[in-house]
Image: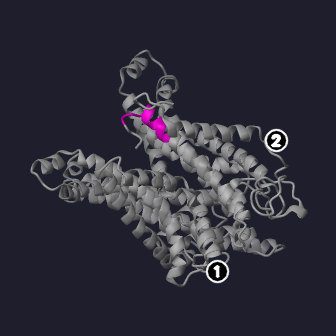
Protein backbone atom coordinates (compact mmCIF):
# COMPACT_ATOMS: atom_id res chain seq x y z
CA UNK A 1 0.00 0.00 0.00
CA UNK A 2 1.47 3.30 -1.04
CA UNK A 3 0.85 6.83 0.11
CA UNK A 4 0.33 9.71 -2.26
CA UNK A 5 4.07 10.15 -2.75
CA UNK A 6 4.36 6.53 -3.90
CA UNK A 7 6.20 5.39 -0.78
CA UNK A 8 5.22 2.27 1.10
CA UNK A 9 2.76 3.21 3.86
CA UNK A 10 4.04 1.05 6.71
CA UNK A 11 1.24 1.71 9.19
CA UNK A 12 -1.53 1.03 6.67
CA UNK A 13 0.19 -2.11 5.40
CA UNK A 14 0.71 -3.46 8.91
CA UNK A 15 -2.92 -2.66 9.76
CA UNK A 16 -4.20 -4.43 6.65
CA UNK A 17 -2.03 -7.48 7.31
CA UNK A 18 -3.16 -7.67 10.94
CA UNK A 19 -6.84 -7.46 9.97
CA UNK A 20 -6.22 -10.11 7.32
CA UNK A 21 -4.58 -12.34 9.93
CA UNK A 22 -7.56 -11.95 12.28
CA UNK A 23 -9.94 -12.65 9.40
CA UNK A 24 -8.09 -15.80 8.36
CA UNK A 25 -7.90 -17.05 11.96
CA UNK A 26 -11.62 -16.35 12.34
CA UNK A 27 -12.49 -18.22 9.16
CA UNK A 28 -10.29 -21.21 9.98
CA UNK A 29 -11.25 -21.17 13.68
CA UNK A 30 -12.28 -24.85 13.85
CA UNK A 31 -8.93 -25.86 12.31
CA UNK A 32 -6.55 -23.59 14.22
CA UNK A 33 -8.17 -23.44 17.66
CA UNK A 34 -6.51 -26.03 19.90
CA UNK A 35 -9.66 -26.67 21.98
CA UNK A 36 -13.43 -26.41 21.84
CA UNK A 37 -14.07 -22.78 22.93
CA UNK A 38 -17.07 -23.74 25.09
CA UNK A 39 -15.74 -26.96 26.61
CA UNK A 40 -15.06 -26.42 30.29
CA UNK A 41 -12.71 -28.46 32.40
CA UNK A 42 -13.10 -28.24 36.16
CA UNK A 43 -9.61 -29.58 36.78
CA UNK A 44 -7.99 -26.85 34.69
CA UNK A 45 -9.61 -23.68 35.98
CA UNK A 46 -7.85 -20.27 35.94
CA UNK A 47 -4.55 -21.56 34.61
CA UNK A 48 -2.15 -18.73 33.67
CA UNK A 49 -0.52 -18.48 30.21
CA UNK A 50 2.26 -20.92 29.48
CA UNK A 51 5.15 -18.51 30.22
CA UNK A 52 3.85 -17.72 33.72
CA UNK A 53 4.47 -19.87 36.75
CA UNK A 54 2.00 -22.74 36.80
CA UNK A 55 1.13 -22.43 33.11
CA UNK A 56 0.60 -25.59 31.04
CA UNK A 57 1.63 -26.09 27.43
CA UNK A 58 -1.81 -27.53 26.55
CA UNK A 59 -3.35 -24.14 27.33
CA UNK A 60 -1.00 -21.62 25.69
CA UNK A 61 -2.83 -18.50 26.88
CA UNK A 62 -4.30 -20.05 30.02
CA UNK A 63 -7.89 -20.85 30.94
CA UNK A 64 -10.83 -18.95 32.41
CA UNK A 65 -12.85 -19.55 35.57
CA UNK A 66 -14.70 -22.46 33.92
CA UNK A 67 -11.51 -24.02 32.61
CA UNK A 68 -12.14 -22.99 28.99
CA UNK A 69 -9.12 -22.42 26.77
CA UNK A 70 -8.50 -18.66 26.38
CA UNK A 71 -6.64 -18.93 23.06
CA UNK A 72 -9.48 -20.88 21.45
CA UNK A 73 -12.03 -18.45 22.81
CA UNK A 74 -10.04 -15.50 21.45
CA UNK A 75 -9.90 -17.12 17.99
CA UNK A 76 -13.62 -17.88 17.99
CA UNK A 77 -14.18 -14.42 19.48
CA UNK A 78 -12.54 -12.91 16.39
CA UNK A 79 -15.19 -14.76 14.40
CA UNK A 80 -18.00 -13.18 16.41
CA UNK A 81 -16.54 -9.66 16.47
CA UNK A 82 -15.57 -9.56 12.79
CA UNK A 83 -18.76 -11.20 11.51
CA UNK A 84 -21.02 -9.00 13.61
CA UNK A 85 -18.90 -5.94 12.85
CA UNK A 86 -18.79 -6.43 9.08
CA UNK A 87 -22.45 -7.44 8.88
CA UNK A 88 -23.50 -4.41 10.93
CA UNK A 89 -21.39 -2.04 8.84
CA UNK A 90 -22.91 -3.50 5.65
CA UNK A 91 -26.41 -3.27 7.10
CA UNK A 92 -25.95 0.34 8.19
CA UNK A 93 -24.30 1.13 4.85
CA UNK A 94 -27.13 -0.39 2.84
CA UNK A 95 -29.89 1.41 4.75
CA UNK A 96 -27.98 4.69 4.92
CA UNK A 97 -26.94 4.71 1.27
CA UNK A 98 -30.42 3.85 0.02
CA UNK A 99 -32.08 6.52 2.15
CA UNK A 100 -29.30 9.06 1.52
CA UNK A 101 -29.65 8.69 -2.25
CA UNK A 102 -33.44 8.87 -2.02
CA UNK A 103 -33.30 12.02 0.12
CA UNK A 104 -30.67 13.72 -2.00
CA UNK A 105 -32.07 12.85 -5.41
CA UNK A 106 -35.81 13.18 -4.84
CA UNK A 107 -35.54 16.14 -2.48
CA UNK A 108 -38.75 17.75 -1.27
CA UNK A 109 -40.96 15.85 1.12
CA UNK A 110 -38.96 12.59 1.07
CA UNK A 111 -35.80 14.56 1.84
CA UNK A 112 -37.49 16.39 4.72
CA UNK A 113 -38.82 13.21 6.33
CA UNK A 114 -35.58 11.24 6.00
CA UNK A 115 -33.33 14.06 7.15
CA UNK A 116 -35.49 14.95 10.15
CA UNK A 117 -35.30 11.31 11.27
CA UNK A 118 -31.53 11.41 10.72
CA UNK A 119 -31.27 14.58 12.84
CA UNK A 120 -33.31 13.10 15.66
CA UNK A 121 -31.61 9.71 15.67
CA UNK A 122 -28.12 11.19 15.52
CA UNK A 123 -28.94 13.21 18.64
CA UNK A 124 -29.14 10.05 20.72
CA UNK A 125 -25.72 8.94 22.00
CA UNK A 126 -25.05 5.81 19.94
CA UNK A 127 -24.28 3.54 22.89
CA UNK A 128 -27.38 4.66 24.81
CA UNK A 129 -29.56 4.17 21.72
CA UNK A 130 -28.01 0.74 21.11
CA UNK A 131 -28.57 -0.30 24.74
CA UNK A 132 -32.18 0.86 24.55
CA UNK A 133 -32.84 -1.14 21.37
CA UNK A 134 -31.00 -4.17 22.77
CA UNK A 135 -33.09 -4.08 25.94
CA UNK A 136 -36.22 -4.06 23.79
CA UNK A 137 -35.48 -6.76 21.19
CA UNK A 138 -33.59 -9.24 23.36
CA UNK A 139 -30.29 -11.03 23.02
CA UNK A 140 -28.97 -12.69 19.88
CA UNK A 141 -26.09 -12.14 17.46
CA UNK A 142 -28.51 -11.29 14.64
CA UNK A 143 -30.31 -8.76 16.81
CA UNK A 144 -26.98 -7.08 17.55
CA UNK A 145 -26.40 -6.67 13.80
CA UNK A 146 -29.89 -5.20 13.36
CA UNK A 147 -29.41 -2.86 16.30
CA UNK A 148 -26.04 -1.59 15.11
CA UNK A 149 -27.48 -1.14 11.61
CA UNK A 150 -30.33 0.93 13.03
CA UNK A 151 -27.98 3.00 15.18
CA UNK A 152 -25.33 3.81 12.56
CA UNK A 153 -27.15 4.15 9.19
CA UNK A 154 -27.75 7.86 9.85
CA UNK A 155 -24.07 8.72 9.35
CA UNK A 156 -24.05 7.17 5.88
CA UNK A 157 -27.34 8.84 4.99
CA UNK A 158 -26.10 12.32 5.86
CA UNK A 159 -22.82 11.90 3.98
CA UNK A 160 -24.34 10.24 0.90
CA UNK A 161 -27.11 12.82 0.67
CA UNK A 162 -24.51 15.59 0.54
CA UNK A 163 -22.69 13.84 -2.30
CA UNK A 164 -25.90 13.24 -4.23
CA UNK A 165 -26.90 16.91 -4.01
CA UNK A 166 -23.87 17.81 -6.12
CA UNK A 167 -24.04 14.70 -8.36
CA UNK A 168 -27.64 15.61 -9.24
CA UNK A 169 -26.46 18.76 -10.98
CA UNK A 170 -23.89 16.98 -13.13
CA UNK A 171 -24.35 16.57 -16.88
CA UNK A 172 -24.50 12.78 -16.96
CA UNK A 173 -27.47 12.80 -14.60
CA UNK A 174 -29.21 15.57 -16.55
CA UNK A 175 -28.66 13.61 -19.76
CA UNK A 176 -30.17 10.53 -18.19
CA UNK A 177 -33.21 12.59 -17.20
CA UNK A 178 -33.53 13.91 -20.76
CA UNK A 179 -33.40 10.40 -22.23
CA UNK A 180 -36.39 9.58 -20.05
CA UNK A 181 -34.80 7.28 -17.49
CA UNK A 182 -36.96 6.77 -14.41
CA UNK A 183 -35.88 8.23 -11.07
CA UNK A 184 -35.30 4.73 -9.71
CA UNK A 185 -33.08 3.83 -12.66
CA UNK A 186 -31.07 7.05 -12.34
CA UNK A 187 -30.57 6.50 -8.62
CA UNK A 188 -29.44 2.89 -9.04
CA UNK A 189 -27.51 3.06 -12.32
CA UNK A 190 -26.08 6.58 -12.32
CA UNK A 191 -25.90 7.88 -8.76
CA UNK A 192 -25.14 4.74 -6.75
CA UNK A 193 -21.87 3.84 -8.56
CA UNK A 194 -20.62 7.35 -7.82
CA UNK A 195 -21.20 7.20 -4.07
CA UNK A 196 -19.85 3.69 -3.51
CA UNK A 197 -16.31 4.99 -2.88
CA UNK A 198 -17.49 7.31 -0.15
CA UNK A 199 -19.58 4.56 1.42
CA UNK A 200 -16.71 2.07 1.44
CA UNK A 201 -14.35 4.57 3.08
CA UNK A 202 -16.91 5.43 5.74
CA UNK A 203 -17.60 1.72 6.28
CA UNK A 204 -13.92 1.07 7.00
CA UNK A 205 -13.80 3.99 9.41
CA UNK A 206 -17.00 2.75 11.08
CA UNK A 207 -15.86 -0.86 11.47
CA UNK A 208 -13.82 -0.06 14.59
CA UNK A 209 -16.60 2.01 16.14
CA UNK A 210 -19.10 -0.77 15.53
CA UNK A 211 -16.82 -3.45 17.01
CA UNK A 212 -16.34 -1.39 20.19
CA UNK A 213 -20.09 -0.86 20.48
CA UNK A 214 -20.72 -4.60 20.05
CA UNK A 215 -18.11 -5.35 22.71
CA UNK A 216 -19.71 -2.80 25.06
CA UNK A 217 -23.18 -4.30 24.54
CA UNK A 218 -21.85 -7.82 25.14
CA UNK A 219 -19.94 -6.60 28.19
CA UNK A 220 -23.16 -5.13 29.63
CA UNK A 221 -25.02 -8.37 28.97
CA UNK A 222 -27.32 -7.12 26.20
CA UNK A 223 -25.19 -8.07 23.20
CA UNK A 224 -24.07 -11.45 21.94
CA UNK A 225 -25.47 -14.00 24.44
CA UNK A 226 -23.26 -16.45 26.37
CA UNK A 227 -21.77 -19.02 26.02
CA UNK A 228 -20.63 -17.51 22.71
CA UNK A 229 -16.97 -16.54 22.94
CA UNK A 230 -17.35 -12.82 22.18
CA UNK A 231 -14.48 -10.58 23.30
CA UNK A 232 -16.82 -8.26 25.22
CA UNK A 233 -18.33 -11.24 27.05
CA UNK A 234 -14.90 -12.58 27.92
CA UNK A 235 -14.06 -9.22 29.51
CA UNK A 236 -17.28 -9.31 31.54
CA UNK A 237 -16.59 -12.91 32.63
CA UNK A 238 -13.02 -12.08 33.60
CA UNK A 239 -13.94 -9.15 35.83
CA UNK A 240 -14.22 -11.18 39.04
CA UNK A 241 -10.96 -13.03 38.44
CA UNK A 242 -9.22 -9.73 37.63
CA UNK A 243 -9.73 -8.57 41.21
CA UNK A 244 -7.60 -11.47 42.43
CA UNK A 245 -4.83 -10.89 39.92
CA UNK A 246 -5.87 -13.16 37.01
CA UNK A 247 -4.72 -10.52 34.53
CA UNK A 248 -4.83 -12.61 31.35
CA UNK A 249 -8.62 -12.80 31.30
CA UNK A 250 -8.76 -9.00 31.07
CA UNK A 251 -5.62 -8.05 29.19
CA UNK A 252 -5.85 -10.52 26.29
CA UNK A 253 -9.45 -10.01 25.03
CA UNK A 254 -9.08 -6.23 25.40
CA UNK A 255 -5.80 -6.27 23.47
CA UNK A 256 -7.57 -8.13 20.65
CA UNK A 257 -10.29 -5.46 20.53
CA UNK A 258 -7.70 -2.67 20.62
CA UNK A 259 -5.59 -4.17 17.81
CA UNK A 260 -8.61 -4.81 15.58
CA UNK A 261 -10.12 -1.39 16.11
CA UNK A 262 -6.80 0.40 15.72
CA UNK A 263 -6.10 -1.47 12.47
CA UNK A 264 -9.54 -0.64 11.09
CA UNK A 265 -9.03 2.99 12.05
CA UNK A 266 -5.58 3.24 10.42
CA UNK A 267 -6.89 1.52 7.30
CA UNK A 268 -9.90 3.85 7.24
CA UNK A 269 -7.68 6.93 7.48
CA UNK A 270 -5.53 5.56 4.67
CA UNK A 271 -8.52 4.92 2.42
CA UNK A 272 -9.90 8.36 3.18
CA UNK A 273 -6.63 10.00 2.17
CA UNK A 274 -6.58 7.95 -1.02
CA UNK A 275 -10.19 8.21 -2.11
CA UNK A 276 -11.29 11.46 -0.52
CA UNK A 277 -8.39 13.85 -1.10
CA UNK A 278 -10.61 16.90 -0.74
CA UNK A 279 -11.35 15.92 2.84
CA UNK A 280 -15.16 15.97 2.70
CA UNK A 281 -15.28 13.31 5.37
CA UNK A 282 -13.09 14.97 7.94
CA UNK B 1 -35.34 41.09 11.55
CA UNK B 2 -32.37 39.69 9.63
CA UNK B 3 -31.92 36.01 10.25
CA UNK B 4 -35.46 35.78 11.58
CA UNK B 5 -36.45 33.09 9.10
CA UNK B 6 -33.33 31.08 9.86
CA UNK B 7 -34.06 31.44 13.57
CA UNK B 8 -37.64 30.26 13.11
CA UNK B 9 -36.66 27.34 10.90
CA UNK B 10 -34.10 26.08 13.40
CA UNK B 11 -36.71 26.32 16.15
CA UNK B 12 -39.19 24.28 14.11
CA UNK B 13 -36.54 21.68 13.23
CA UNK B 14 -35.62 21.27 16.90
CA UNK B 15 -39.29 20.77 17.81
CA UNK B 16 -39.68 18.18 15.04
CA UNK B 17 -36.54 16.37 16.24
CA UNK B 18 -37.93 16.18 19.77
CA UNK B 19 -41.24 14.84 18.45
CA UNK B 20 -39.44 12.19 16.37
CA UNK B 21 -37.30 11.24 19.37
CA UNK B 22 -40.41 10.65 21.46
CA UNK B 23 -42.06 8.70 18.63
CA UNK B 24 -38.95 6.52 18.19
CA UNK B 25 -38.64 5.76 21.88
CA UNK B 26 -42.34 4.94 22.25
CA UNK B 27 -42.52 2.84 19.08
CA UNK B 28 -39.45 0.74 19.89
CA UNK B 29 -40.69 0.26 23.46
CA UNK B 30 -43.71 -1.52 21.99
CA UNK B 31 -41.34 -4.02 20.36
CA UNK B 32 -40.19 -5.00 23.85
CA UNK B 33 -43.52 -6.54 24.72
CA UNK B 34 -46.27 -5.73 27.18
CA UNK B 35 -45.00 -3.93 30.28
CA UNK B 36 -48.09 -5.03 32.19
CA UNK B 37 -46.83 -8.61 32.40
CA UNK B 38 -43.70 -7.24 34.11
CA UNK B 39 -45.67 -5.18 36.60
CA UNK B 40 -48.17 -7.73 37.93
CA UNK B 41 -47.72 -10.95 39.82
CA UNK B 42 -47.88 -14.01 37.59
CA UNK B 43 -51.41 -15.37 37.73
CA UNK B 44 -53.06 -11.97 38.17
CA UNK B 45 -56.71 -11.99 37.15
CA UNK B 46 -57.76 -10.74 33.72
CA UNK B 47 -59.76 -7.97 35.43
CA UNK B 48 -56.62 -6.72 37.19
CA UNK B 49 -54.66 -6.81 33.94
CA UNK B 50 -57.37 -4.87 32.12
CA UNK B 51 -57.61 -2.32 34.93
CA UNK B 52 -53.85 -1.70 34.87
CA UNK B 53 -53.82 -1.45 31.09
CA UNK B 54 -56.57 1.13 31.27
CA UNK B 55 -54.81 3.09 34.01
CA UNK B 56 -51.60 3.22 31.95
CA UNK B 57 -53.51 4.13 28.80
CA UNK B 58 -52.34 0.98 27.03
CA UNK B 59 -55.86 0.24 25.78
CA UNK B 60 -55.78 3.35 23.58
CA UNK B 61 -54.72 3.25 19.91
CA UNK B 62 -50.99 3.96 19.31
CA UNK B 63 -51.47 7.54 18.11
CA UNK B 64 -53.53 8.44 21.14
CA UNK B 65 -50.84 6.92 23.35
CA UNK B 66 -48.22 8.94 21.50
CA UNK B 67 -50.11 12.22 21.99
CA UNK B 68 -50.53 11.48 25.68
CA UNK B 69 -46.84 10.55 25.96
CA UNK B 70 -45.83 13.86 24.35
CA UNK B 71 -48.27 15.80 26.51
CA UNK B 72 -46.84 14.23 29.66
CA UNK B 73 -43.26 14.60 28.45
CA UNK B 74 -43.71 18.35 27.98
CA UNK B 75 -44.78 18.66 31.61
CA UNK B 76 -41.76 16.61 32.67
CA UNK B 77 -43.61 13.34 33.31
CA UNK B 78 -42.06 10.28 31.66
CA UNK B 79 -43.89 7.71 33.72
CA UNK B 80 -43.18 5.87 36.94
CA UNK B 81 -40.28 3.50 37.45
CA UNK B 82 -41.54 -0.08 37.65
CA UNK B 83 -38.75 -1.07 40.03
CA UNK B 84 -38.44 1.96 42.30
CA UNK B 85 -42.04 3.15 42.10
CA UNK B 86 -40.73 6.73 41.74
CA UNK B 87 -41.03 9.22 38.89
CA UNK B 88 -38.55 8.28 36.14
CA UNK B 89 -37.56 11.91 35.59
CA UNK B 90 -37.07 12.30 39.34
CA UNK B 91 -34.68 9.34 39.34
CA UNK B 92 -32.79 10.89 36.44
CA UNK B 93 -32.29 14.13 38.33
CA UNK B 94 -31.33 12.26 41.52
CA UNK B 95 -28.46 10.67 39.63
CA UNK B 96 -27.53 13.78 37.63
CA UNK B 97 -25.15 15.39 40.21
CA UNK B 98 -22.92 12.30 40.38
CA UNK B 99 -22.74 12.16 36.59
CA UNK B 100 -22.04 15.90 36.37
CA UNK B 101 -19.18 15.56 38.86
CA UNK B 102 -17.62 12.67 36.95
CA UNK B 103 -18.20 14.22 33.53
CA UNK B 104 -17.00 17.64 34.71
CA UNK B 105 -13.71 16.21 35.97
CA UNK B 106 -13.17 14.10 32.85
CA UNK B 107 -14.13 17.07 30.69
CA UNK B 108 -11.71 19.45 32.42
CA UNK B 109 -8.63 17.30 31.94
CA UNK B 110 -9.55 16.14 28.46
CA UNK B 111 -10.05 19.72 27.25
CA UNK B 112 -6.88 21.05 28.87
CA UNK B 113 -4.75 18.22 27.56
CA UNK B 114 -6.44 17.98 24.16
CA UNK B 115 -6.26 21.69 23.36
CA UNK B 116 -2.81 22.13 24.90
CA UNK B 117 -1.18 19.29 23.00
CA UNK B 118 -3.23 20.05 19.87
CA UNK B 119 -2.01 23.66 19.71
CA UNK B 120 1.61 22.72 20.38
CA UNK B 121 1.48 19.95 17.81
CA UNK B 122 -0.02 22.23 15.15
CA UNK B 123 2.58 24.92 15.83
CA UNK B 124 5.35 22.47 14.91
CA UNK B 125 3.95 19.64 12.78
CA UNK B 126 6.23 16.62 12.95
CA UNK B 127 7.85 17.52 16.29
CA UNK B 128 8.21 14.90 19.03
CA UNK B 129 5.09 16.06 20.85
CA UNK B 130 3.13 15.93 17.59
CA UNK B 131 4.17 12.33 16.98
CA UNK B 132 3.54 11.24 20.57
CA UNK B 133 0.19 13.04 20.44
CA UNK B 134 -0.78 11.31 17.20
CA UNK B 135 -0.03 7.87 18.63
CA UNK B 136 -1.85 8.66 21.89
CA UNK B 137 -4.84 9.99 19.95
CA UNK B 138 -4.96 6.85 17.82
CA UNK B 139 -4.84 4.61 20.90
CA UNK B 140 -7.35 6.81 22.73
CA UNK B 141 -9.83 6.63 19.88
CA UNK B 142 -9.39 2.84 19.48
CA UNK B 143 -9.22 1.67 23.07
CA UNK B 144 -12.57 0.61 24.50
CA UNK B 145 -13.03 2.87 27.54
CA UNK B 146 -14.18 0.00 29.73
CA UNK B 147 -11.07 -2.03 28.99
CA UNK B 148 -8.86 0.93 29.86
CA UNK B 149 -10.87 1.29 33.06
CA UNK B 150 -10.23 -2.36 33.93
CA UNK B 151 -6.51 -2.00 33.26
CA UNK B 152 -6.42 0.97 35.64
CA UNK B 153 -8.20 -1.08 38.32
CA UNK B 154 -5.74 -3.93 37.84
CA UNK B 155 -2.76 -1.62 38.21
CA UNK B 156 -3.84 0.94 40.81
CA UNK B 157 -6.27 -1.10 42.93
CA UNK B 158 -5.22 -4.74 42.66
CA UNK B 159 -1.47 -4.36 42.15
CA UNK B 160 -0.48 -1.11 43.92
CA UNK B 161 -3.54 -0.89 46.22
CA UNK B 162 -3.51 2.93 45.93
CA UNK B 163 -7.06 3.62 44.83
CA UNK B 164 -10.43 2.05 45.65
CA UNK B 165 -11.66 -0.15 42.77
CA UNK B 166 -15.25 1.07 42.90
CA UNK B 167 -17.80 3.18 44.73
CA UNK B 168 -18.00 6.91 45.39
CA UNK B 169 -17.61 9.39 48.20
CA UNK B 170 -14.08 10.78 48.08
CA UNK B 171 -11.75 12.25 45.49
CA UNK B 172 -9.89 8.95 45.43
CA UNK B 173 -12.98 7.25 44.02
CA UNK B 174 -13.14 9.84 41.27
CA UNK B 175 -9.61 9.50 39.86
CA UNK B 176 -9.87 6.31 37.80
CA UNK B 177 -13.39 6.79 36.38
CA UNK B 178 -12.48 10.35 35.35
CA UNK B 179 -9.29 9.21 33.66
CA UNK B 180 -10.92 6.35 31.75
CA UNK B 181 -13.95 8.44 30.76
CA UNK B 182 -11.87 11.39 29.56
CA UNK B 183 -9.29 9.43 27.59
CA UNK B 184 -11.33 9.03 24.41
CA UNK B 185 -12.50 12.63 24.54
CA UNK B 186 -8.96 13.96 25.11
CA UNK B 187 -7.99 12.15 21.92
CA UNK B 188 -10.93 13.60 20.04
CA UNK B 189 -10.25 17.15 21.30
CA UNK B 190 -6.58 16.78 20.38
CA UNK B 191 -7.31 15.66 16.83
CA UNK B 192 -9.80 18.42 16.12
CA UNK B 193 -7.72 21.17 17.76
CA UNK B 194 -4.68 20.16 15.73
CA UNK B 195 -6.47 20.16 12.38
CA UNK B 196 -8.42 23.37 13.15
CA UNK B 197 -5.18 25.09 14.21
CA UNK B 198 -3.36 23.95 11.08
CA UNK B 199 -6.14 25.43 8.99
CA UNK B 200 -6.26 28.64 10.99
CA UNK B 201 -2.47 29.07 10.73
CA UNK B 202 -2.87 29.12 6.93
CA UNK B 203 -5.41 31.95 7.00
CA UNK B 204 -4.83 35.48 5.73
CA UNK B 205 -5.20 37.16 9.11
CA UNK B 206 -2.50 34.94 10.60
CA UNK B 207 -0.23 35.70 7.65
CA UNK B 208 -0.86 39.39 8.18
CA UNK B 209 -0.02 39.10 11.87
CA UNK B 210 3.25 37.38 10.92
CA UNK B 211 4.03 40.04 8.32
CA UNK B 212 3.59 42.68 10.96
CA UNK B 213 6.46 40.98 12.76
CA UNK B 214 4.62 39.69 15.80
CA UNK B 215 6.33 37.09 17.96
CA UNK B 216 5.25 33.58 16.95
CA UNK B 217 3.67 32.70 20.33
CA UNK B 218 1.51 35.80 20.07
CA UNK B 219 0.48 34.93 16.52
CA UNK B 220 -0.54 31.48 17.69
CA UNK B 221 -2.33 32.39 20.90
CA UNK B 222 -3.93 35.71 19.97
CA UNK B 223 -4.66 35.31 16.26
CA UNK B 224 -4.75 31.64 15.23
CA UNK B 225 -6.25 30.07 18.37
CA UNK B 226 -9.49 32.09 18.66
CA UNK B 227 -10.44 31.22 15.09
CA UNK B 228 -9.69 27.54 15.65
CA UNK B 229 -11.60 27.38 18.90
CA UNK B 230 -15.11 27.64 17.40
CA UNK B 231 -15.34 24.05 16.09
CA UNK B 232 -13.44 22.78 19.14
CA UNK B 233 -15.84 24.42 21.59
CA UNK B 234 -18.83 23.07 19.63
CA UNK B 235 -17.43 19.54 19.77
CA UNK B 236 -16.48 19.93 23.43
CA UNK B 237 -20.04 20.95 24.35
CA UNK B 238 -21.47 17.90 22.59
CA UNK B 239 -18.81 15.70 24.18
CA UNK B 240 -19.77 16.97 27.62
CA UNK B 241 -23.39 15.90 27.11
CA UNK B 242 -22.14 12.54 25.86
CA UNK B 243 -19.97 12.13 28.96
CA UNK B 244 -22.95 12.84 31.23
CA UNK B 245 -25.28 10.42 29.47
CA UNK B 246 -23.19 7.80 27.73
CA UNK B 247 -20.81 6.81 30.53
CA UNK B 248 -22.77 3.56 31.00
CA UNK B 249 -19.86 1.13 30.91
CA UNK B 250 -17.50 3.29 32.97
CA UNK B 251 -20.11 3.90 35.66
CA UNK B 252 -20.96 0.19 35.66
CA UNK B 253 -17.35 -0.90 36.14
CA UNK B 254 -16.70 1.56 38.95
CA UNK B 255 -20.20 1.33 40.51
CA UNK B 256 -20.44 5.10 40.16
CA UNK B 257 -24.01 6.16 41.06
CA UNK B 258 -24.69 8.26 37.95
CA UNK B 259 -27.06 8.20 35.01
CA UNK B 260 -25.13 5.50 33.14
CA UNK B 261 -25.41 3.20 36.13
CA UNK B 262 -29.13 4.05 36.37
CA UNK B 263 -29.54 2.97 32.75
CA UNK B 264 -27.63 -0.26 33.43
CA UNK B 265 -29.82 -1.08 36.44
CA UNK B 266 -32.93 -0.23 34.45
CA UNK B 267 -31.91 -2.76 31.78
CA UNK B 268 -31.39 -5.52 34.34
CA UNK B 269 -34.84 -4.86 35.85
CA UNK B 270 -36.42 -4.20 32.43
CA UNK B 271 -37.60 -0.92 33.91
CA UNK B 272 -38.91 0.55 30.66
CA UNK B 273 -40.00 4.03 31.87
CA UNK B 274 -36.51 4.67 33.27
CA UNK B 275 -34.82 3.46 30.06
CA UNK B 276 -37.15 5.72 28.07
CA UNK B 277 -36.37 8.67 30.33
CA UNK B 278 -32.59 8.30 30.01
CA UNK B 279 -32.71 7.90 26.21
CA UNK B 280 -35.10 10.83 25.78
CA UNK B 281 -33.22 13.14 28.13
CA UNK B 282 -29.85 12.49 26.48
CA UNK B 283 -31.27 12.92 22.95
CA UNK B 284 -33.19 16.07 23.89
CA UNK B 285 -30.11 17.63 25.46
CA UNK B 286 -28.16 17.19 22.22
CA UNK B 287 -31.06 18.59 20.15
CA UNK B 288 -31.27 21.66 22.41
CA UNK B 289 -27.50 22.06 22.40
CA UNK B 290 -27.40 21.94 18.59
CA UNK B 291 -30.18 24.53 18.52
CA UNK B 292 -28.26 26.78 20.92
CA UNK B 293 -25.03 26.55 18.87
CA UNK B 294 -26.91 27.30 15.64
CA UNK B 295 -28.53 30.34 17.19
CA UNK B 296 -25.19 31.47 18.62
CA UNK B 297 -23.64 31.20 15.17
CA UNK B 298 -26.45 33.37 13.79
CA UNK B 299 -25.74 35.94 16.45
CA UNK B 300 -21.98 35.87 15.87
CA UNK B 301 -21.57 35.31 12.15
CA UNK B 302 -23.17 37.83 9.76
CA UNK B 303 -22.61 35.49 6.79
CA UNK B 304 -25.18 33.03 8.15
CA UNK B 305 -27.53 35.85 9.14
CA UNK B 306 -27.74 37.16 5.60
CA UNK B 307 -27.51 33.83 3.78
CA UNK B 308 -31.24 33.44 3.24
Helix or strand or loop: what does disc 1 sit on?
Answer: loop
Q: Are marks 2 and 1 in contact (CB under 8 Å)?
A: no
In this view, A85 is above or below A63: above
Task: Give the residue displayed 55% in from the left and 50% down from the top.
Answer: A209
List the residue tagged with mark 1.
B85
List the residue tagged with mark 2.
A30
In this view, B13 is above or below B169: above
From the viewer's perspective, tell me whether residue A132 is left or right of residue B299.
Answer: right
The x and y percentages for residue A246 are 73, 66
Tell me the chief SS of the magenta region.
helix
From the viewer's perspective, tell me whether residue A230 is left or right of residue B166.
Answer: right
The x and y percentages for residue B238 are 41, 61
Q: Nearer the viewer, residue B291 or B97?
A: B97
Task: Give the residue displayed 49% in from the left and 45% down from the top.
Answer: A155
The x and y percentages for residue B174 are 51, 77
From the viewer's perspective, tell me whether residue A11 is left or right of residue A251.
Answer: left
Q: Quadrant of the C terminus of chain A?
A: top left
Residue A73 seen in this snapshot? yes
The x and y percentages for residue B26 are 59, 60
- Whether A45 is among the magenta residues is no
Instruction: Pinpoint the chain carrying mark 2.
Output: A
Q: Nearer the viewer, residue A244 or B11?
A: A244
- Whether A274 is among the magenta residues is yes
Q: Which residues are magenta?
A: A268-278
3D distance between C-alphas at marks 2 and 1: 50 Å
Amino acid sequence: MRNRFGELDLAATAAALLLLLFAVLAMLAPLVAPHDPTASSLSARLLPPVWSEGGQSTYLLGTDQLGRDVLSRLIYGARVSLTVGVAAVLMAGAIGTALGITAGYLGGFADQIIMRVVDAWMAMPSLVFAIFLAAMVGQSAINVVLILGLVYWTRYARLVRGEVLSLRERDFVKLAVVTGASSLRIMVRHILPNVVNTTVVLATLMLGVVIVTEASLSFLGVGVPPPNPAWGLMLADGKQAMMVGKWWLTVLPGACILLTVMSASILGDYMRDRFDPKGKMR
Amino acid sequence: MPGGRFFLRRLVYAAISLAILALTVLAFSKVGGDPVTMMLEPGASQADIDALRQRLGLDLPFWAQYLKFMQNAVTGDLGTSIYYGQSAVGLYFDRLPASLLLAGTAFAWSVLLGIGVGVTAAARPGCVLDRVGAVLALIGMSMPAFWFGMLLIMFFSVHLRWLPSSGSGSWRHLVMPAISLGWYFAASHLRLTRSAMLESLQSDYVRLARLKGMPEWRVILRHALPGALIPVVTLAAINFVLMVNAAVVIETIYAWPGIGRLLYEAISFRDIPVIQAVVLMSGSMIVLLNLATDLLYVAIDPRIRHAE
